Image: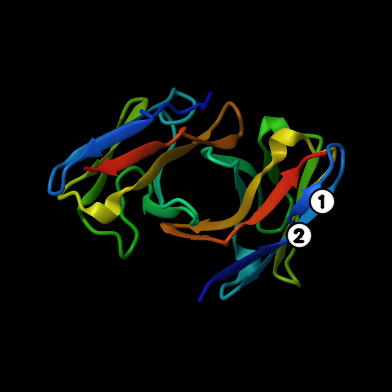
Amino acid sequence: QSVLTQPPSASGTPGQRVTISCSGSSSNIGSNYVYWYQQVPGTAPKLLIYRNNQRPSGVPDRFSGSKSGTSASLAISGLRSDDEADYYCAAWDDSLSGRVFGGGTKLTVL
Amino acid sequence: EVQLVESGGGLVQPGGSLRLSCAASGFTFSSYWMSWVRQAPGKGLEWVANIKEDGSEKNYVDSVKGRFTISRDNAKTSLYLQMNSLRVEDTAVYYCELYSSGSDFWGQGTLVTVSS
């Protein structure tokens, strides 16, 4: 059972907009930054969003992050077939003194 | 170019020990926190531990406290994870990670299999 809660799956058709939610608590999302990672199976994760809504250099603006209270969301617009991957949210947890990840969301592009 | 190369994984029996290494290059290793993150087969990501630039502060996930020790050698630009009293549930790919201000780098991972 992950500390951060994500839906196990999400899907969309090419061109659509998809959102993935991440729910936490006051000790993690509620008081710290949220990060989002994309992982294609068999490869290392790639940072998509840092500090709630910032994109690293090279990440397309089709990816956006938001945070409200103890929840966060990742939105992907203009869905492409190569967006098919697993997506994870993460945050520091003050109570655990450690970083926590969501269980991951498998995105399928139909 | 930042490079992180893990090594030291392999097959070990329950109760055994392994020491993972992560050779870092392409950045000033002594200036950054470093982390270990693992991923069990077919499962999600799990943060394991991190260590401050000078090694003076370390944090661990509860499930490895007292069994795993993270360390670093800044002169050798290397990160380590000493894993003792290994359990079947420690089976995973172990990644070392560097994060700093929106830049994030991962190694290719090293597989640790705990099985009799």
Residue holding disc 1: B18
- Between B78 and A33, the one lying in front of the other is B78
**Residue A23 shown left or right of residue B111 in the figure:** left
- Residue at 42% x, 55% y is A46
Number of other residues with Cα within 10 Å of mark 2, as a class: few under 14, some 14 to 19, many 20 or more:
some
- Residue at 25% x, 46% y is A64
What is the chain letter for disc 1? B
Badge 2 amino acid = Gly
Q: Is residue A15 above or below residue B65?
A: below
Q: Residue B69 in the image: x percent, y percent?
A: 78, 46
Label 1 – label 2 distance at C-alpha: 7 Å
Sequence-wise first label, 1 or 2: 2
Q: In which quadrant of the rendered view does residue A55 lie? A: bottom left
Q: Residue B20 in the image: x percent, y percent?
A: 75, 56
Number of other residues with Cα within 10 Å of mark 1, as a class: few under 14, some 14 to 19, many 20 or more:
some
Quadrant showing the C terminus of chain A: top left
**Residue A38 shown left or right of residue A63 in the figure:** right
Numbered tag placed on residue B37 in the rendering: none
**Residue A75 shown left or right of residue A22 in the figure:** left
What is the image's colouring?
rainbow
Badge 1 amino acid = Leu
Q: Is mark 2 on a helix, strand or loop?
A: loop
Numbered tag placed on residue B8 in the rendering: 2
What is the chain letter for disc 2? B
